[in-house]
Image (cartoon, rainbow, N blue to C red):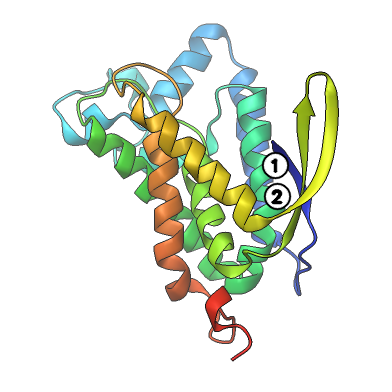
Amino acid sequence: MIPLRDDNPTRRPAVVTVAIIIACVVVFAWHFSLSENGRQAFVYSLGFIPATLFGDRELPPELHLVPAEMTLFTSLFVHGGLLHLVGNMLYLWIFGNNVEDAMGHGRFIVFYLVCGLAASMAQGLINPGMALPMIGASGAVAGILGAYLLLHPTARVLVVIPIFIFPYFVYLPAVAVLGLWFLLQFINSLGANPDEPGVAWFAHLGGFIAGMLLIPLFKGRNVPLFWQKGR
């Protein structure tokens, strides 16, 4: 099931959402303009490696571009492939504009980074000795999904469901789309080996939960959560 768009209008342009997408695309183009060795060095230099923050591992001097603490944020703009980038940016584009609209531009930037931080920490604390780099915006985007769920659970989302070779288009409520997304992350996390490379399922869960917990603090004063509407 792939979301394509929602029918939820906004009051103001999503300038920060667009800026984040542009930044991720620019970093991706820079990353893949490098040689194969250069791309690997790029990921190790800017990706988040739990062992360098929680353990005693240190990067070689030529890879130590930023402090380990900064990689909690730089890693959010690095992606490992085109599908990785497109998937994250699609979810950000569909759901980020309404969350940004509910907060305002400045608070949305802070919210995005804090959710990304929470996601990275959730994955890193599962295996603090992991020496593989974590990259991608998915943890921060997961925070946006958690916030959207509490803001607009009944909004309609157009999704495409592949049935054999045929695409099936249907509108579903956001609570179904995002609830299923979270359930799949949880199920996959149960069988995940944190010592092996792959999807950072715990980062997705951590980011989503952080978004749900933080949205009451970051939303505008006059913006209701779903249970406050109609009062």
Q: Nearer the viewer, residue 169 or 65?
A: 169
- For label 1, count other residues whose C-alpha is less than 10 Å away and answer few (under 14), some (14-19) or many (20+): some
Residue 58: percent from left, percent from top: 21, 23
**Quarter containing the N terminus:** top right
Per the model, the C-alpha gap separating discs 1 and 2 is 5 Å
> Position of 138 compared to 193: left or right?
right
Amino acid type of the residue tagged 2 in the rendering: Trp
Residue 130: quadrant of the picture: top left
Task: Give the residue furthest to the top.
Answer: 36
Residue 119: quadrant of the picture: top left
Please give the residue where the numbered disc 2 appears in the rendered image. 93
User: Do callouts 1 and 2 mark residues in contact (Cβ within 8 Å)?
Assistant: yes
- Vertical side of 170 occupied by 50: above or below: above
- Vertical side of 181 occupied by 98: above or below: below
Residue 157: percent from left, percent from top: 74, 53
Q: Is residue 162 visible?
A: yes
Please give the residue where the numbered disc 1 appears in the rendered image. 90
